[in-house]
Image (tube, rainbow, N blue to C red):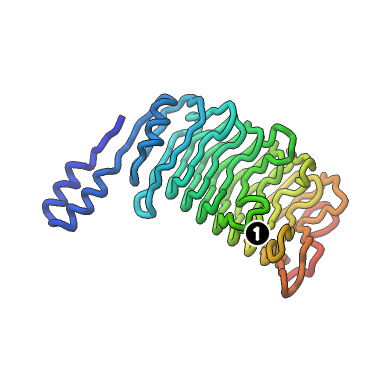
Amino acid sequence: MRNRPLLVSLLTDALATGGLGLAAASADASAAVIDVSTASQLKSALGAAHPGDTIRLADGTYTGNFKTTSAGTSSARITLTGSSKAVLKASGGYGLHLNGASYWTVQGLTVTGGQKGIMMDAASGVVIDSVTVHGLSMEGVHFRKSSKNGVIRNSRVYDTGRDGSGMGEGVYVGTAGDLADRSDQVQILDNTIGPGVGGENVDVKEGTTGTRIAGNHFDGSGLTNANYDDSWVDVKGNKVVVEGNTGVHTLNNGYETHTQQSGWGCGTVFRSNKSDLSDSPGSLRLAVNVTNFHASGCPTTVYGSNTVTGGKGLTNIPVTP
């Protein structure tokens, strides 16, 4: 159901303030609240969404693959919201695909089943807030094809990568081997990722810059080592900040930096992370394993505020006080 409860007051304001108010009212009046309770209604609402709209999901299971190419704006975001009992359930493909759909907020709901959970392609400014993503054969949440300035926060991602290929990352930023994918300035904040994540909890790819990973709890008990996944976080992008996270259960190290392509994997900063490597069976067992350190050409900074329990030590590079 499409409701426009603000229309009358907006038009009244427009008449009182003249043409400028009329223009503002016209823009605001186009926004609507769309209440949906079936999969077909949801698909229609996603396809017809306009800047400022809010799509509200009733509790229940919505079966299918859901996608949109409709974009909001920085001043008139589109919101898809529901409780954790509003479940998007796919049997293959993507659960929710924002394809060119910038400036969306996805809030509260659950995505499960299928190959991948929530996919952003060329969708900037997307905020994923307080969602649950689980039960997938591959990755949970993916910012791809230059999906800049995205945020995932206060969310839970678990039970991914069920096909055992080691490509079931919890949160994935960028594209392997594709430097044209500039999914820059993505923020991964205050999430619980794992258990049962069959890949790194977070994988930041070469070509991307400025990812911030902060306040998360990582559980690597689902790591497989099938595709070199033996740490909570792999950093292959530039100027990444990793701070205030906690991690338990890993196959080898807590965090790793890598140069997959020349000039990438540099400038990472680690601070105030707490790593528990007590049950790590790996050979290195470092909280932060820097594979590509060069003090001037490819720096990494590991601050003394990081702590580690168990394992063989904090890091393999000089620690900054």
Quarter of the C terminus within the rendering:
bottom right
Q: Categorize mark 1 by other alpha carbons within 10 Å: few (<14), some (14-19), many (20+).
A: many
Quarter of the N terminus within the rendering:
top left
Q: Tell me, yes or no, if residue 321 can be seen here.
A: no
User: Residue 32, relative to residue 254: is it above or below?
Assistant: above
Q: Residue furthest right?
A: 283
Left or right, 41 with respect to 185, comes to left
Measured from the top left, where is residue 74 in percent x and y?
39, 54
Instruction: Residue under label 1, please give it.
Output: 237
- Amino acid under disc 1: Gly
Left or right, 104 with respect to 139, comes to left
Task: Identify which residue, 196 or 91, lies in the foreground.
Answer: 91
Measured from the top left, where is residue 154 in percent x and y?
54, 45
Residue under the image location 48 percent in, 49 percent down: 123
Measured from the top left, where is residue 116 in percent x and y?
60, 36
Task: Identify which residue, 83 or 112, lies in the foreground.
Answer: 112
* Secondary structure type for disc 1: loop
Residue under the image location 51 percent in, 42 percent down: 130
User: Residue 88, relative to residue 269: is it above or below?
Assistant: above
